[in-house]
Amino acid sequence: MTETLIPPIEESLADLDRLDLRTRMFIDGEFRDAAGGDRFVTENPATGRPITEVAEGGPADVDIAVAAARRAADDGRWSRLDPGARKRILIAWADLIETHARELGLIETIDAGKPITDTVGLDMPETAACIRWHAEAVDKLYGQVAPSPEGTIATITREPCGVVGAVIPWNYPAQMAAWKLGPALATGNTVVIKPASTTSLSLLRIVELGSEAGLPDGVVNVVTGPGGTVGEAIGRHPDIDCVAFTGSTEVGRRFLHYAADSNLKRVLLELGGKSPQIVFGDVSDLGSVAANVAVAIFWNMGENCSAGSRLIVHRSRKAALLEAIESELASWPVGDPLDPATRIGALISKDQMERVLGYIDIGRQEGARVVTGGSRILEETGGWFVPPTVFDRVTNDMRIAREEIFGPVLSVIEFDTEAEAVAIANDTPYGLAASLYTHDLDVAHRVAREVRAGVVGINAYSEGDMTTPFGGYKQSGFGGHDKSVHAHDQYTETKTIWIQLRPPA
Ligand code: NAD
């Protein structure tokens, strides 16, 4: 269904003029200006030009939103609603997101620079699918009865945490919101969510659709604005019970401080990565490996937490694989994100582009060799475009192999033995994802166990699907996992009720 939704570029341009953007915060069921009346400009990364102004919230707005979420949590208008009714509302919401996929995808494309084929064809259907998946679980989540001694009954039930704060990044604005909202709402919480300030627009429309679907007022509240004010106010708020953060490791660390300095709220962290892709010497179909490698690092312009940014390849296959990757890149056109042919759109901002170009300079200075890409392109558009860039002759101690670049930059590192490949893969502060390519079942199983990462793809780049948890080891985060039933654990408290039965009279 999604393919037919992806508009030809002329239609997208016509639709742009018809877009009615939501630019005010959404609190207690209605759109509002920021308490201080401030607004900030959000721009189109593909043109560098302003799209509109968005309400710039601050701590006072977080207070108002948290008060609304608290009232909704305390009076049980959501948590005590019949589970079947909650399920129906969430499913209706997912359906609305799907039927508005084209409008929402267009909003996401102009706000985030992401190719329209991805936003309409993937991001929005996945956003709807995530909400629907969790919705379907609402009336299938059971508690337990413990094997307690005769004369007692002990039940173990799950209760919502209460008010969840969510702070999300700009790379998958709608999907990251759904990864938090789906499980948090399915388990009966109310939410105050802050999108990244560069990408507020899709979420504001999505929550409006939530209201239309029947979400009671105050259950989902959106405060827009900068991380340093709105994000910090959420992190420190004494009346937020749990905060779910997706973003950089640096800011994730701050959330631990915020919680420690305030009310010890539960902190869930989904952070950065420097994920390895290991290609063993026995692989035969290098064309298919190259296609997977390209998706792993160049999909979403490399602005992907699980991007496979380190290609660790057996010395015997490196030259052939590099050739295969170069051929594969012929089918990765960079350009106008509104063009359905585009696979690589614009980086999110000028700052991000400069950061990526800065790392490319560092790679050159460190002695790595640029095989393809390596400089800004399409400057005449005013947008922030960097083509797929591949560095050969990288060693794992170089900064381009250690630090998260969050752009379309692949570092190629050679190895000779399996032990060496595993050691290189694990020699990183991160542990979000990994992929490995081999036809040898023993090697595949052994290495999948030895690599310290939350998600390991074998013979494919994959983050799994809604049925599998997603989350990292080491400095890629902790505290829980997004997706799957595991996500429900992180938004619930476990309650034991111990009943002493009176003996027969
Ligand atoms: P970021 O850490 O800069 O920002 C994330 C969010 O935190 C934004 O909403 C931002 O406004 C807010 N923020 C910024 N400074 C803050 C502060 N001082 N206090 C409170 N909040 C603050 O990250 P980003 O640049 O938006 O996104 C890129 C990062 O996100 C990458 O490191 C990437 O790996 C990570 N990421 C991780 C996952 C995952 O599931 N593990 C998914 C997507 C992105």
Image (spheres, rainbow, N blue to C red):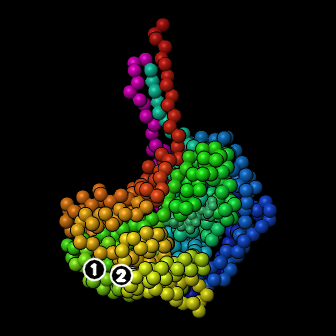
Q: Amino acid at mark 1?
A: Lys
Residue 109 image position (x, y, % from top left): 56, 76
Looking at the image, is 319 positioned above or below residue 436? below
Q: What residue is shown with label 1?
A: 318
Q: Which mark is residue 180?
A: none
Taking the image in four quarters, ligand 1 sits in the one at bottom right
Instruction: Tell me where residue 156 appears, x and y as whole percent.
Output: 47, 33
Which residues make up the magenta segment?
129-151
Q: Which residue is mark 2?
A: 392
Quadrant of the rendered structure where residue 195 is?
A: bottom right
At label 2, which amino acid type do we have? Asp
C-alpha span from label 1 to label 2: 9 Å
Mark 1–mark 2 CB contact (< 8 Å): yes
Q: Horizontal and vertical percent for residue 294?
A: 38, 77
478 or 463, which is in the foreground? Answer: 478
Q: Residue at x 61, y 66 (%)?
A: 196
| Residue 250 covered by magenta stretch | no
Query: In terms of depth relative to the viewer, which is nearer, 124 or 398?
Result: 398
